[in-house]
Image (cartoon, rainbow, N blue to C red):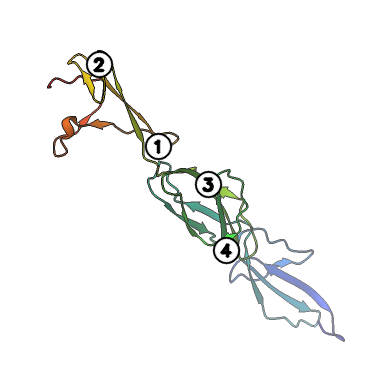
Amino acid sequence: DPEPSSGISWTRYCQIARCDPDTDYMASIVISAENINYLRYASKDTANNLQPTQELIIKLDKSAPVTSDNAPADWQPEDVSILLTPLDIYSGVALTKYCADSENACIPNTQGISLSVTCPADTVCNKYVRYYSIDHVQNKEEIKNTTLIKIDKEKPLTELTIGTPKYITDKNYVTSHTEIALHGDDGTGSGIAKTEYNINDNINGNWIEYTAPFTLVNE
């Protein structure tokens, strides 16, 4: 009430949309519920002049964004495209930052929601993507990380072992009782899925899946 005036008789408020102020104002009002809050208020002076009801809409956001990723759990044969999906249902997402390393220790400093996790040719790579998001009122998500992203571009190696009896000169001579064994090795990669062999370089013939040592029947 401006000076000089009759003085304030009361100030009242309520906290529901379209409500009529009916609670006497005695102390600071605490707004604690997230999302949209309404504060409606009015005052009356001792000369019975009543202020029109005023309304204040307060949008409260106390929660950090939640970001998810699409990182695959299985081994991949090629570079992997990662998409980060941030969500903030109140003030909205302001930005997302990420980084990638093999130790799961980097500090996210690149802004964006998509990236390619790469691996050089003929190598095996294991990497994490670390990330967080911030909303428009600066609530910051804790740094999160993807599952370990495993990329295997290294070709396996197969070792052939010839049993006995055998005779080795410039060629390998064996009998129909000589066992031949194959051993596949994929190093630190995804592991051997299967080993196949073909006899007499029959490229157009059927390849046979190796399950145990075998012998040669035909000369």
Q: Relative to 92, is 47 on the left or the right? A: right
Distance from the alpha carbon under mark 3 to that under mark 1: 17 Å
Q: Relative to 160, is 107 on the left or the right? A: right
Distance from the alpha carbon under mark 4 to that under mark 1: 35 Å
Whichever of callouts 4 and 3 sits on the residue coming sooner in the sequence is 4
Distance from the alpha carbon under mark 2 to that under mark 1: 35 Å
Residue flagged by tag 2: what amino acid is it? Lys
Distance from the alpha carbon under mark 2 to that under mark 3: 50 Å
- Residue named by callout 2: 166
Q: Circle 4: is it few (<14), some (14-19), or many (20+) Cα within 10 Å? A: some
Q: Relative to 39, is 126 on the left or the right? A: left
Residue 214 lies in quadrant: top left
- Residue named by callout 4: 95
Disc number placed over residue 190 in the picture, else none: 1
Which callout, 2 or 1, points to the residue nearer the camera?
2
Look at the numbered discs 3 and 1 and tell me whether their residues touch, using CB distance below 8 Å: no
Whichever of callouts 4 and 1 sits on the residue coming sooner in the sequence is 4
Which callout, 4 or 2, points to the residue nearer the camera?
2
In what element is the residue under mark 2?
A: strand
Q: How many marks?
A: 4
Q: Circle 2: is it few (<14), some (14-19), or many (20+) Cα within 10 Å? A: few
Residue flagged by tag 3: what amino acid is it? Tyr
Q: x%, y% of residue 49?
A: 75, 83
Distance from the alpha carbon under mark 4 to that under mark 2: 69 Å
Whichever of callouts 3 and 1 sits on the residue coming sooner in the sequence is 3
Residue flagged by tag 4: what amino acid is it? Leu
Residue flagged by tag 1: what amino acid is it? Ser
At 52% from the left edge and 46% from the top edge, which residue is drawn? 128
